[in-house]
Each structure stands twice: as structure tokens, then as C-alpha cells.
Image: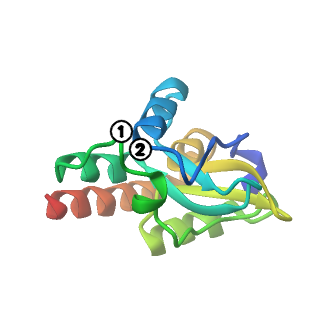
Amino acid sequence: MRVQDVMSKGAKTIESGSTVQDAAEAMDEFKIGALVVVDQSQKMLGMLTERDIVSLVSNGKDARKEKVETIMKKEVYFVRPKDDLEDAVDLMLKNKVTKLPVIEGSALVGMLTTTDIASAEPRLLDQIVAVMSIKKQQQTMAG
């Protein structure tokens, strides 16, 4: 099975100069947990997750004033549509991430999440549970 068989098409983006408040509102509107951060020419610069926003707010910062570029993760792991799904799961597990942007050429074409994988390929569920368990342990240790 390939990434393109299970990915969510049309990943949502936000420009790096937007406020964290704008990002939180977009996540709420689209019912998603991450945004790909782009520059004005739509080049991918990073990724912003719900956890990044929670961390900012819990540290007393104002989401209405802070820019996305100040808290986004700059090191972003990604996959391509024709990549093998098991390889994508391995990448998630190795890097302890639950979401991967899907890039074709230089274009963002979708997002692959553990939820997408669990829905489409139940036999990979054990690996997905391992990824999510690691993420939960990290969040517990982070405070």
C-alpha cells in the first residue's frame, strides 16, 4: 500500500508571519491538529502542532502577539505519495511524529496522519500505537 492510498488530500497551511491565534483558529475551524507553515510563495518552512500552541500558552505568552515562525518546528519529516506506507510508519516511529506532510515535486499535496493509517491499514495499528505512546510519554515528561 502507498501513502497516496490513505493520505488526507489538501493539507492546510499558514504563513509564517501569521499569529499563533490565527493558527489556533484555523485548526479549530478545520478540526485538525497541525498546519504546514509556508512563506508567501507557499514554500514549506516548518510545521505547527496543537502541542506547540499549548506550550506557548502554558508559558504565559500571548497567542495574539506571537508569530507562528517563532514556535514552529523547522525540522519537518515528510513523505511522497508513492512511498510505501510501512516506510512512512517507520519514519513516524523513528522520529516520534504522528503527522507527515506529503510532498510531490515541490508541492504540498496532503498530510498523512496516524488516524489515516489506522483507518486504512489496521494491521499497522501496533506500530501506530507505539508512536502515540511515545508522544504521550514525551508530553507527560514535558509537563
The answer to whether the residue labelled 2 contacts the one labelled 1, judged by CB atoms less than 8 Å apart, is: yes
Residue located at (62% from left, 51% from top):
112
Residue 56 screen position, x and y as percent:
27, 52
Residue pictured at 58% horizontal, 69% vertical: 77
Q: Mark 2 points at which residue?
A: 20
Residue 105 left/right relative to 112: right
Q: Determine the secondary structure under disc 1.
A: loop
Residue, x 76% and y 57% (percent of image)?
A: 2
In the image, which disc is placed on residue 64?
A: 1
| Eye-nearest disc, 2 or 1 | 1
Q: Nearer the viewer, residue 17 or 73?
A: 17
Q: Which of marks 2 and 1 is nearer the N terminus?
A: 2
Left or right: residue 86 versus residue 99 is right
- Amino acid beneath label 1: Arg
Residue at the top extreme of this rendering: 29
Question: With 136 as the anchor, is 88 left or right in this view?
Answer: right
Classify residue 142 by image quadrant: bottom left
Q: How many marks?
A: 2
Whether 132 is drawn above or below 21: the answer is below
Measured Cα–Cα span from mark 2 to mark 1 = 6 Å
